[in-house]
Structure formats: C-alpha cells, structure tokens
Amino acid sequence: YFLSLSSSLISHINATLCLPIKRPPQETKHSTSFNMAKIVRVVLSVLVVSSVSFLSNSLSVDYYHHTCPHVEKAVTCAVKRAMANDRTVPAALLRMHFHDCFVRGCDGSVLLVSSGKDKAEKDGPPNISLHAFYVIDNAKKAVEELCPGVVSCADILALAARDAVALSGGPTWEVPKGRKDGRVSKARETIQLPAPTFNFSQLCQSFSQRGLSSEDLVALSGGHTLGFSHCSSFQNRIHNFDASHDVDPSLDPAFAASLRRVCPAHNKVKNAGATMDSTVAVFDNTYFKLLLQGKSLFSSDQALLTHPETKKLVSQFAFSEETFFKAFVRSMIKMGRIPGSSTAGQEVRLDCKVVR
C-alpha cells in the first residue's frame, strides 16, 4: 500500500518534529492485576472470545506510566519523522499492525526476519508488500535509549499504527499496552490472513475466529481509506469475472474501465495498481461513500454490501464520519487485544527483528 501526503501536511510535520526526550530516572516496575469480575464474565463467553478477553486483561493504557512514561512521545516522533520523508508510512504501519494481530495475535511476530530455511511471516505471500519496518526499528532504538528492555516491539507497533491514523487526519485513542513479543514467526501461517478475494462468509469466519464482530469487520475495512493496491489484488473483478461477465457487474462501469486501462489482462508493470480511495492522503469516510457507488477495489470490499447488517453499517459510516471514527477506534482497541498464541516463551525484544 502506498500513501500520498499533501505538501501542506508534510510541511506541518516538518515544523513539529520532536525535540530530544530526557531519559527518566529509574522507577519501580509497574504491575497489573486481574479483575475477577471480568474473569467471571469471560468464562461465560464463547471459547474464542473468552480467550481473547482473559489474556488481554493485563493490558492497560498506563502500563508504562512508571517504567517508561515518555514511550508514546518517542514513538510519535519516529512516525512523524518518517512521514515527513516517506509517503508510504501511514498505510504501511496500519496494515502491518493488522497483519501482526491476525497471525498469532498482536505479538510483533510480523517484525521478525527469516533465519535460514525458517521463513518468517514477513516473507509469507500476503506480506511480501509490507514495508516501513524501519519506522518501528527507529522507534525501538529511541525507546531503548529511554527505557532499556522495558517496552515490547508489539506495543511500539500498536502505538505507531494509532499515530499513523491520527497524523493522517483520523481519530486518536489511548492504546492499551503491556503486550509481549512472540518468539515464533512462520511464513506458512500467513494463509490465515483474510484475502482481498474473500466473500462475506469467509470474512465473517476469519474475524469471528479472533473474537471480532461484523461491526469490527466493517469498521476495520475503513482502514482501506489509506493506501494503494497492486493489480493482482483486484484483477479477479476486472477480467474473467465469471462465466457470464468479464467484469464484476457490481462495479461502476466507468470506474471498471479506468481500472482495466491501468491493469490490462496481461499486465507486466510490476507496480501498477490503484489508490484505495480518492482521498488517499487523508483518513476519512470516503472509502464507504465510494463503496456505495460501486467504486471499491476488492471483492472483500464489495462483500460488505451483500449482507443487510453490514450494508447498513456501510451506509451509516458513509453518512457520518464521526460514527465511523468512533466505531474504528473501538475496533482497533478490540483487535489490539488479540493475545499472542501462547504466553510461554514470550519476551521483550531488544531488537524487533530478532528474538533474544
């Protein structure tokens, strides 16, 4: 995914780059405790949702209040600096966080590099186009200077994704923190990621397996307001759609024609593609407005209109940006609480690319 930032936004970012942060004095490590009432409610829930809720109780918005009070400022500075020089950063960070959470939970496993024949998630087919890992590396270095060995890479990624949205004109929110970094990353497990060709049933199954609802599905799909897609992700809609149609009939004809010009049937241009919506530099609700007009890229986007409940949500978000923003924040916090696949062997990495 690529992002084009306006010149005025770049100027603003350049004008507000962060000053150095003083390292705080050593303080007693913050601890959290389980809320027994929450645990009781969790036991009464369905298995998948209960697992997510129970293991995420340890997350807290003030988790680093005593141990690393300036962590958020350090991460925000790293994101701002990157955005000032790299137009692809916001979409890349948001997508990276999503891909991290949907495979093994939000444990930073997407950040690990492959070792020999052991291919890591970032080398799995759906993740080949992930980029801007350097932003997380830079943020981690800054945080390590402040608070060595305290803040996980998984938390830094969650914070960076929030900043990517907020600095692109979207909402901001308090990020619950306290995640640990996983020690396992397998390329073959990226098959678990929802594909752009998924239909409604496949999308629902993918999200429900992670304790996410149909509202979460629609709200998080709104993240497509940022970025760019290569032709391969929507080629199925504009060439040989089915036995009766060469082009998906749900696409606006003029829009489909423009996509076919950019992405011909035998496209050989490696980076050919289209922006996800017409306001690619801004996090807004334009994605939903275009979806209702038949101007979405993915089959998975169009799938949101094939069920009454999700179609109603699309309409609500298209009508009210405020409603979308509130739902998006709720869903991002909820997704960010998907736990790592196992608490055993997790750690706080010193380098986000490798385990300790």
Image: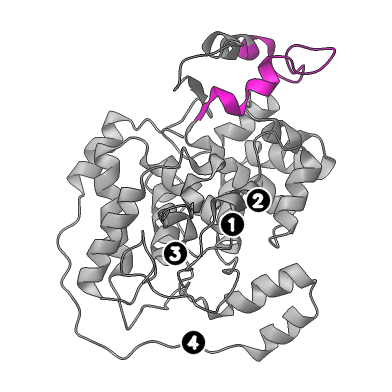
Q: Which label sits in the foreground, 3 or 2? A: 2
Sort mark 1 into few (<14), some (14-19) or many (20+) by Cα contacts within 10 Å. many
- Nearer to the camera, 244 or 50: 244
Q: Quadrant of residue 89?
A: top left
99 over 168 or under it: above or below = below
Type of amino acid under label 2:
Gln
Q: Which mark is residue 192?
A: 2
- Determine which residue is flagged by label 4: 32
**Cα distance, mark 2 to mark 4?**
32 Å
- Determine which residue is flagged by label 1: 103
In the picture, measured across the screen, residue 353 lies left or right of residue 146, that is right
Is residue 232 on the magenta stretch? yes
Type of amino acid under label 3:
Ala
Mark earlier in primary sequence (3, 2): 3
SS class, disc 3? helix
In the picture, measured across the screen, residue 227 lies left or right of residue 231, that is left
Type of amino acid under label 1:
Val
Start-end of magenta stretch:
229-256
**Cα distance, mark 3 to mark 2?**
19 Å
- Nearer to the camera, 328 or 52: 52
- Determine which residue is flagged by label 3: 154
Measured as percent of width and height from the top left, residue 176 is found at 49, 70
273 over 300 or under it: above or below = above
SS class, disc 2? helix
Residue at 63 percent of width and 34 percent of height: 288
**Cα distance, mark 4 to mark 3?**
18 Å
